[in-house]
Image: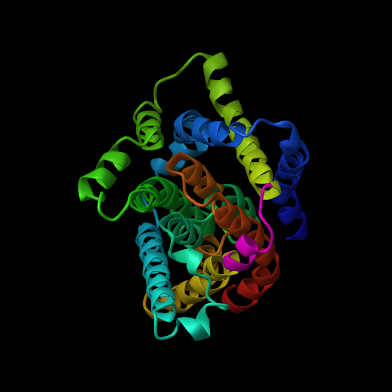
Amino acid sequence: MTETLFHAYAPLILWTSLGLLIFKFLPQWFPRLLGRCLYWFGVPLELLALARQRGFNEFAGEVSLPILAPIITLGVLVLGLVMTSLILKGWKLLLSDKLKPYSAKLFPPYLLDSSSSGSFVISAVLGNTGFVGLAIAPSLVSSDGVNWAVLYSITHNVIGTYGFGVVIASYFSHSQQQNRWWMQLRDVLSVPSLWAFLFGYLTRSVQLPEIIESGLQGSVNIVIACAFLLTGIRLAQLQGWKSLKLAFVPAFLRVFLTPLLVGLATTLFFGLSGSPRLAMVLMSGVPTAFAGLILAEEYNLDRDLITSSIIISTLLLLLVLPLWILVFG
């Protein structure tokens, strides 16, 4: 397991460290430009390549798939939204006129800002199921459990990150007076990643020239490196302890509370055990998604909060992973 985590985290450490080192030499507009390029071009290329991969084609053609995995994935997304909504409402209550003198120091008022609230929700709801989840799952669960993990990752990335995630980012990027339901629908329908994945899936049987096919697959590593680089740049720009302190809450929800509830629910209500159950726990408890930072760049949300949550949740995973293997393995 230690070797698996090392291989999974090596690119993260390398490219994030590079971002920390070079941010002083970059113009101020570069991080936002990099984030928007990843949103409009990088991630769509990555999903297009994923949909055309031979392993995915073989997996998509199987008839005995664990259909319960996408249902659990959707349940986890809804669970995250419910928990963060309750926390935000509780935060507002604690900062009301009656309780504000007693709670202002413990519960900072800046979370009520729309930008920070949106990043708070995204940090807790969206997980890195692709790079981290699918990197560690094959060494910890059986081949049957890996199928569950792959279906979870596909559902989470397509419906979660670029469905739920875009709706959340779009909603919190507008003022309450300007918000209309059709704005979120318009933003979801215009997400390039969804169209790229759909195009790749529908054309997976079409043989492209070798140079194009290899270029598509090679673009995946470039996109991942750029996402880590952006994380390092934003990490270097953090302003003191404020964002790190606030990020402990969504990181705790993402890495500890959510997978704990998933493990208990899948055992009690669905009767899962062994590798399938562990796969669902692992995938629901991966660190905050790097895609959250890309959404923050595109929709002008709080980048510091998401960056801090990525780092803290990644470190927390190292502590709780042995616990999930012991309890739900």
In this view of the protein, which residue sits in the foreground, 123 or 14?
Answer: 123
Whether residue 140 is visible to the viewer of this picture, yes or no, is no
Q: Is residue 241 magenta?
A: yes
- Locate residue 218: give its quadrant: top right
Q: Position of residue 277 (x, y in %)?
A: 50, 69
In this view of the protein, which residue sits in the foreground, 62 or 323?
Answer: 323
Q: Residue at x 44, y 36 (%)?
A: 57
Q: Is residue 167 above or below residue 222?
A: below
Q: Position of residue 128 (x, y in %)?
A: 55, 52
Q: Is residue 179 magenta?
A: no
Q: Position of residue 67 (x, y in %)?
A: 35, 57
In this view of the protein, which residue sits in the foreground, 191 or 209?
Answer: 191
Q: How many marks?
A: 0
Image check: 258 left or right of 191? right
Q: Residue at x 46, y 44 (%)?
A: 300
Which stretch did the figure color magenta?
237-246
Image check: 65 left or right of 39? left
Quarter that holds the N terminus: bottom right
Q: Residue at x 51, y 82 (%)?
A: 103
Q: Position of residue 216 (x, y in %)?
A: 54, 25
Whether residue 286 is visible to the viewer of this picture, yes or no, is yes
Q: Is residue 136 above or below residue 166?
A: below
Q: Is residue 316 above or below residue 15?
A: below
